[in-house]
Image (cartoon, rainbow, N blue to C red):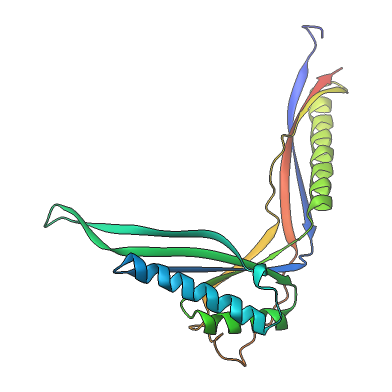
Amino acid sequence: MNQEQKTIRVMGTGFVKTVPDTTRLTFEVDSLHDTYEKAYNEAAIGNKNLREALGMLNIPKDSLKTTNFSITKKTEWKSKENKHVFVGFELRQELAIELPLDSVITSKVMSTLGKAWPELDVDISFIKKDTHDVKLQILESAVKDAREKAEVIAATLGHKLGGIISADYSKRSIDINYHEERLRLCDSGFCDKDASIDYTPDDIEAGDTIETVWYLE
């Protein structure tokens, strides 16, 4: 490379919209107990009830995945006593299940699981199950954007755009999903067998960047 050769560094950004094809329900419980055994028993009974409830819907029990589980000793600072005081054992658990994009099936699952473990909170999100093609489209869009910007910059500086020197796109994870609100199942009426949820999720928008370096002629 000629030391006098001029270069420019340009960041390209790519965006695409895609239609979700899967509903993901993420369940969470956060409760406090005066003994470790009570915390553990809630988790054991709750998990058993959830999987039995799924069986009633002819959904494989192993479809429900545990993503986080902990029972920890919880304390609080008491200024009057000038020390941390034990307040209980905190159970925290997160579980997730993926379902077809079908509001009827989703409503049945939420209603049934809400009865099985009423203390559950649930997050609803809509995702694209297979993201391979989407990620390639994002990358293609980002590269085109980088080149278009580079051509404008080169022309503005009175140069022609030369060849590319490098493109930095390290492997990364793109979160392609659309999140909805969090609900407490029974408080939201989903313990009622007639409860239902009707939704038409919006397209998912996802993006990423690529850093490029170009010669100027």
Q: Is 96 situated left or right of 127 in this image?
A: left
User: Against 28, is 164 above or below?
Assistant: above
Visible residue check, residue 5: yes
The quarter of the picture where residue 36 lies is bottom left
Q: Position of residue 23 (x, y in %)?
A: 70, 69
**Depth order, front residue of 123/113:** 113
Q: Is 72 situated left or right of 62 in this image?
A: left
Q: Is 51 situated left or right of 102 in this image?
A: left
Q: Position of residue 119 (x, y in %)?
A: 46, 77
* Residue positioned 65% across, 73% down in the render: 61
Q: Position of residue 183 (x, y in %)?
A: 53, 75
The quarter of the picture where residue 1 lies is top right
* Residue positioned 85% across, 21% down in the render: 159
**How many numbered circles are shown?**
0
* Residue positioned 60% across, 80% down in the render: 52
**Depth order, front residue of 90/144:** 90
**Depth order, front residue of 122/97:** 97
* Picture quarter with the C terminus: top right
Q: Is 87 situated left or right of 153 in this image?
A: left
